[in-house]
Image (tube, rainbow, N blue to C red):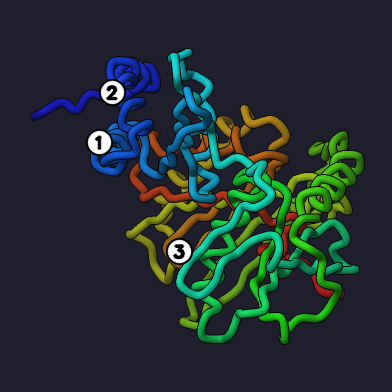
Amino acid sequence: MIEVKKVYNEDFWSWFVDHADRFFETIQSQENISRDFIDVVSIKLNRLRNGFFILTGMYDNDTAELIITADGNVVVIPFIEELVAAAPNIPNWKFTALKPATDREDFEVAFSQASLSADNLFFIYNAHSEYPDLIDIDVVHADITDYTKRLFTQGIFIFLENYIGEMECIDLIDSIDIKAMNKTKGDLIPMSKLSSFLKWRHKELIEKYDQVIHITDADTYTGYESKTKEGETVIASINTKLLNWDHIAAYPWVTVLTLSYDNGSNGMPSDDDYQLLDTFEERVNRLMAKSQYCLNIGRETGEDKRKILYATKDFRQTVKVMDEVMNLDSLYRITYDVFKDKYWRSLDRFRVKE
């Protein structure tokens, strides 16, 4: 059996130092950058973790820059930030975690259908009385049609990540839709004002929610039972006290950990599996307790799956705990998802309708 040696951040940077001069010459000359730099570094990064992507170019006349990006995938962002934080001081090199906001007023993204810039892009803020702190925007361009919307959508997301910054797109915006000019309602706001608008709203949110903490002592759980379209039973135990809390927007990140089992009946686990799933869940709960400001929403069992639900103020610690969970010994297939859901609308099925 061949032992595969795990690559650590220190290994990567030690290797990069050994090749830094040659890499710099490649970037500076702008010759064969894909072959001699991007492909080579990407292979090495993929030995650290899947989901790391890179951009490169000259930061100034004497400095090459390596930007490591998650392409919007939040579950790799903490590991990119850790990797860049561990970077040594290498002459003629600058290392950046995630795409930064551009400082160029003339920044544009060009593709076959159009050129996207602050001059021809606008946004509309969609206010929701039921969800007052939701940052929901439409991005508008005059040339978008039903036939070109998909292409424009790709280009606009690339534009936004580079225009206001990758982390800002993730952290400051809850929902984005791409729309043609003739299908919009509301006031068109120049794209040049988007960053200041988002920072203003974010400042409001911090002032409103930063010190808000949910006290778990009074939590109460309610049992639910339902049937799928196929007639299989699904049961849930949900923290209804928490679900109906007035300040859930203070914990905008939802995590769903899924354990899949095979030996059940009618979608439910066997008695042995039920006990093992409970034991594993307790183990995960202890690990999640390490994550600051973590709330247990509850669990759902059925359709050959146990789903465990959490909410957190930030996603970074949660992602690291989930990464640890993925490496635990288990009889079950483990997957997880971490996503922003400021008002927990994905859990509306558990809310009692009045």
Q: Are the residues tagged 1 and 2 within 8 Å (C-beta)?
A: yes
Q: Quadrant of residue 2?
A: top left
| Front one among 224 and 330 | 330
- Name the amino acid, label 3: Met
Q: Looking at the picture, which amino acid does disc 2 mark?
A: Arg
User: Which residue is more in the foreground, 74 or 334?
Assistant: 74
Disc on the earlier residue, 1 or 2:
2
Question: To which quarter of the image does residue 316 belong?
Answer: top right
In the rendered image, residue 233, in percent from the top left (x then y), is placed at 52, 71
Q: Secondary structure at mark 2?
A: helix
**Spot occupied by residue 337 in the image (x, y as percentages of width and height):** 52, 52
Q: Gap between marks 1 and 2, in whole Å? A: 9 Å
Contact, mark 3 vs mark 1 (Cβ under 8 Å): no
What is the tally of numbered marks visible in this picture? 3
Which secondary structure, mark 3? Answer: loop
Q: Nearer the viewer, mark 2 or mark 3?
A: 2
Q: Is residue 255 left or right of residue 94?
A: right
Q: Earlier in the sequence, mark 3 or mark 1?
A: 1
Residue indicated by mark 2: 22
Quadrant position of residue 327: top left
Report whether 27 appears left or right of 237: left
The label on residue 276 is: none
Q: CA distance from mark 2 to mark 3?
A: 58 Å
Graded by Cα atoms within 10 Å as few (under 14), some (14 to 19) or many (20 or more), the crowding at tag 1 reads: some
Judge left or right: residue 307 versus residue 128.
left
* Mark number, residue 36: 1
Query: What residue is rendered at 79% in x and 38% in y?
Result: 216
Check disc 3 and report the residue beneath it: 268
Label 3 environment density (alpha carbons within 10 Å; few <14, some 14–19, many ≥20) = many
Outermost residue, left side:
1
On the image, the x and y values in percent for residue 338 come to 57, 49
